[in-house]
Image (cartoon, rainbow, N blue to C red):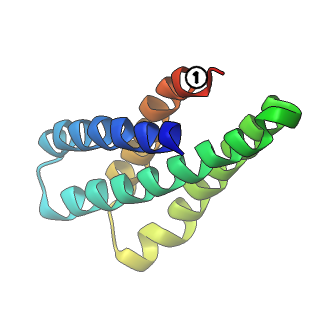
Amino acid sequence: MKRALSFAGLSLVLIVGLAWLLSRLWPTPQAQQAIWFSAGIALAIQVIGFVFVRIFTPVHMIAGWGAGMLLRFVTLVLHALVGTKVMGFPLEPALLSLAAFFFVSTLIEPVFLKP
């Protein structure tokens, strides 16, 4: 539980920092809403993905990591096909920011998975 909370906290810091930077790249109000909405989605999905890996680690860590990656991919596709249209967000900032948030927080995941 402690590792999951530590991962969630560091992911939050990274995602908020990157969202702030990306909101400078796309200064329009709709783009900024898309970026911050994507940040919330990314944080929730990253924590769920991390828990998948932690659950599968004793049995098969690669299966857990694969399940987490599949979850991230499906989330990105659903956000592209449904989320941006329902919310009325511009496609580029919404999807590029979500992919970037997934990327940076996935990079720190192995640090918290060490036994």
Locate the C terminus by quadrant: top right
Relative height, residue 60 to residue 31 (above, below): above
Which residue is at a point 45% across and 37% down the rendered structure image?
7
Relative height, residue 104 to residue 35 (above, below): above
Which residue is at a point 24% across and 44% down the rendered structure image?
16
Residue in the foreground of this view, choosing between 113 and 18: 113
* Total numbered labels: 1
Q: Is residue 72 left or right of residue 29?
A: right
Mark 1 is on which residue type?
Pro
Relative height, residue 25 to residue 94 (above, below): above
Q: Quadrant of residue 114?
A: top right
Residue at the extreme bottom of the image, as rendered: 86
Label 1: how many residues lie within 10 Å, few (<14), some (14-19) or many (20+)? few
Residue 66 is situated, as x and y percent measured from the top left of the image, at: 76, 38
Residue 47 is situated, as x and y percent measured from the top left of the image, at: 52, 49
Q: Is residue 107 left or right of residue 58?
A: left
Residue 35 is situated, as x and y percent measured from the top left of the image, at: 29, 53
Q: Secondary structure at mark 1?
A: helix
The residue labelled by disc 1 is 110
Which residue is at a point 54% across and 46% down the rendered structure image?
1
Residue in the foreground of this view, choosing between 105 and 10: 10
Residue at the extreme right of the image, as rendered: 59
Residue at the extreme front of the image, as rendered: 2
Q: Is residue 90 left or right of residue 70?
A: left
Residue 88 is situated, as x and y percent measured from the top left of the image, at: 34, 74
